Structure formats: C-alpha cells, structure tokens
Amino acid sequence: MNGVQRLIDGVQRLVDGVQRLVDGAKRLNDGAKRLDDGVQRLVDGAKRLVDGAKRLDDGVQRLVDGAKRLDDGVQRLVDGAKRLNDGAKRLNDGVQRLIDGAKRPGTKFKPQDAKMPAPENEAIPAASLSMRGYANAARILNLLTPLIHNQLN
C-alpha cells in the first residue's frame, strides 16, 4: 500500500498545485485588469495634461499680446505727455511774453486796466484766471513729465 498511498498523496499534491495555479491565474488576471485600468488613467491624464498645456500656451500668448498692447499704450502715453509738455512750454512762453510785454515801460495796455462794456467785462477775470491756470498747469507739467517718463522707462 505504500505505493498506492504515495500515488494518492501525489495526486492530492497535484490537485492542490492545480488549485494554486488556478488561484494564481485569477490573481494574475485581476492584476492585469488593475494594470490596464492604471494605464488607461495614465492615458487620460496625459490627454488632460496636453489639453492643459495648450490652454496654458494660449493664455501665455494672450498675455504676451496684452503686454505688447500695454507697451504700445505706454509709448503713446509718453508721446502724448511729450506733446502736452511741449504745448505747455509754448503756452507758458506765450503767457510769459504777454506778461513781460504788459510790464514794459511805456506800454499803454495794462491787462488790469482793461475795461470792456458790460456784460463782457465779466469775461476778463475768468480769462485771466484761465490763463493763470494754464500757466500753472504748464509749470506743473514741466515738473511732472520727466518724473512720469522716468517711471515709465
């Protein structure tokens, strides 16, 4: 019986081994499915990453375009400030020439002595204030323009 018993024991070990093989194959199949799911998540994530990179690139391009428009606008502002400064200087020079001319000895015209028939005579103080305001504005612009220009550059 010794040989039969060994044969029965061998068959039992074979059955146990086949069962372990079947269990291992199931675990291998489950692992392969999990691996396939993980690969699919990686593929989906890579697609989202590519889409995000495209959106980021579009956003960066819009930012670059906006920066160019801002730079152009700043340059137009600087150019406008220069023109305004030049105009303010010319206005200031003109006002100063008027004032200097009115102060010259022998000048018959004195702005403070000018009389106009009513109601137009009310316009003289307003015009005088307006001219002083322009002159003051011109002086202020003469001072501020270099500061603005330095800040922009």
Image (tube, rainbow, N blue to C red):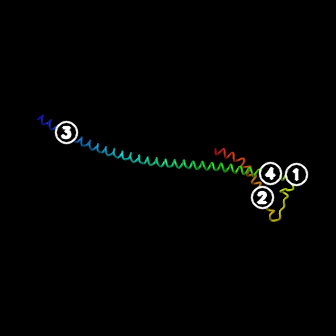
| Residue 133, quarter of the rendered image | bottom right
The residue sitting at 46% across, 48% down in the picture is: 54
Whether residues under marks 1 and 2 lie with C-beta atoms below 8 angstroms apart, the answer is no
Q: Residue at x 88, y 51 (%)?
A: 105
Mark 3 surroundings: few (<14), some (14-19) or many (≥20) residues within 10 A? few
Q: Is residue 16 left or right of residue 95?
A: left
Which residue lies most toward the top here? Answer: 2
Earlier sequence position, callout 3 versus callout 1: 3
Q: Which mark is residue 14?
A: 3
The residue carrying mark 1 is: 105
Residue 1: which quarter of the image?
top left
Question: Which is nearer the eye, 24 or 141?
Answer: 141
Tell whether 74 sits left or right of 56.
right
- Mark 3, mark 1: which one is toward the viewer? 1
Q: Amino acid at mark 2?
A: Ala
Residue bearing mark 2: 127
Label 4 sits on residue = 97
